[in-house]
Amino acid sequence: MKLLSVAIPCYNSQDYMRKAIECLLPGGDEVEIIIVDDGSKDDTGKIADEYAERYPSMVKAIHQENGGHGEAVNTGIRNAEGLYFKVLDSDDWFKEDAYLAVLEKLKDISGGDRVLDMFICNFVYEKEGKKNKKVMTYKTAFPQDELFTWNDVKIFKPGQYILMHSVIYRTRLLKDMKLQLPKHTFYVDNIFVFNPLTQVKTMYYMNVNLYRYFIGRADQSVNEKVMIGRIDQQIKVNKLMIDYMAEAPRNLNKKQERYMLSYISIMMTISSMLLIKEGSKESLEKKAELWNYLKDKDPRDYFRLRFGVLGTNVNLPGKGGRRISVMEYKIAQRFVGFN
């Protein structure tokens, strides 16, 4: 069995996908590289086949009709044979020394007597034009270099969340829970990270900067103008997360539940502030409808997110309220990495 499966969702990625693939090759035969050509119109499929032919023991090239990023991740999970699973977007890459250190640690853990559900490490915002790169670390949130549980989780700073870039899941956990991301929908990486958390019992944090998250293309999904244009998809993902949390078992660890509610809170902030920035009557109605959706689905969580300690303040009136809303939005910008 392979140690790690890495899925690379690709759509018209010919100009940058080679860097993503090449950075994984030093992992050797312990790594399975699953290149998912999601109905590309350029030479993405040819490049995928080229690597599959050159590295048949490492690389799988899978071609499918366009289903969006989520369906490409679904395909990666279905075809993964590694003990652990990670997603690497086709315009991002891993730092080699951190990558090899992570593989060595995963190998050590897999040989132990405890099962690891989720492995976390840092990621770096590779923002185009910025000399100083921002690193998302979790030193304040997790114990380092040891297996731990939710009881051992410490303090998350504002804007400090587990994202797709920082997480490696146990493959069997994803398959057993039948994780299925929606087709033709942006921002589903939030669901990929969020939903499995109800199944996570054991974690390990390694303080290395593995994932390099490129930000800078004008058409990128985290470009603020693009996000406003795709706000209906952001709302859709937000609602799917609300649905999942409403149906989650209520015997979750208190810290586990609090973190998941905090995640929904930041998603509500992002959706609400994008709608406020768009500013039309229709957008403000969508904002109200989103909050009412949460209220109808789970009144308790609605109260906790609207008025409690975890509350988001995007509904406060007056200049003071707007000032607080802007402050929360800046935290949300740190979470997303808007460009």
Image (tube, rainbow, N blue to C red):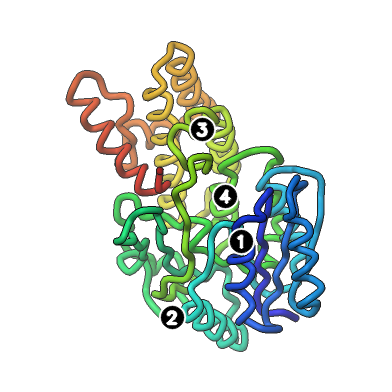
Residue sitting at x 38%, y 29%: 273
Position of residue 166 relative to residue 257, above or below, is below
Q: Do the residues labelled 1 and 4 touch (CB within 8 Å)?
A: yes
The residue carrying mark 4 is 189
What residue is pinned by disc 1?
87
Q: Badge 2 is on which residue? A: 146
Q: In which quarter of the image is residue 207?
A: bottom left
Tell me which amino acid carries mark 4.
Answer: Asp
Q: Is mark 1 on a helix, strand or loop?
A: strand
Which amino acid type is marked by label 3? Asp
User: Which mark lies nearer to you, 3 or 2?
Assistant: 2
Q: Is residue 198 above or below residue 65?
A: below
Circle 1: residue type: Val
The label nearer to you, 4 versus 3, is 4
Type of residue at label 2? Glu
Find numbered disc 4 in the image and state the secondary structure of the residue it sits on.
Answer: helix
Q: Which of 62 and 276 is in front in this view?
A: 62
Q: Earlier in the sequence, mark 4 or mark 3?
A: 4
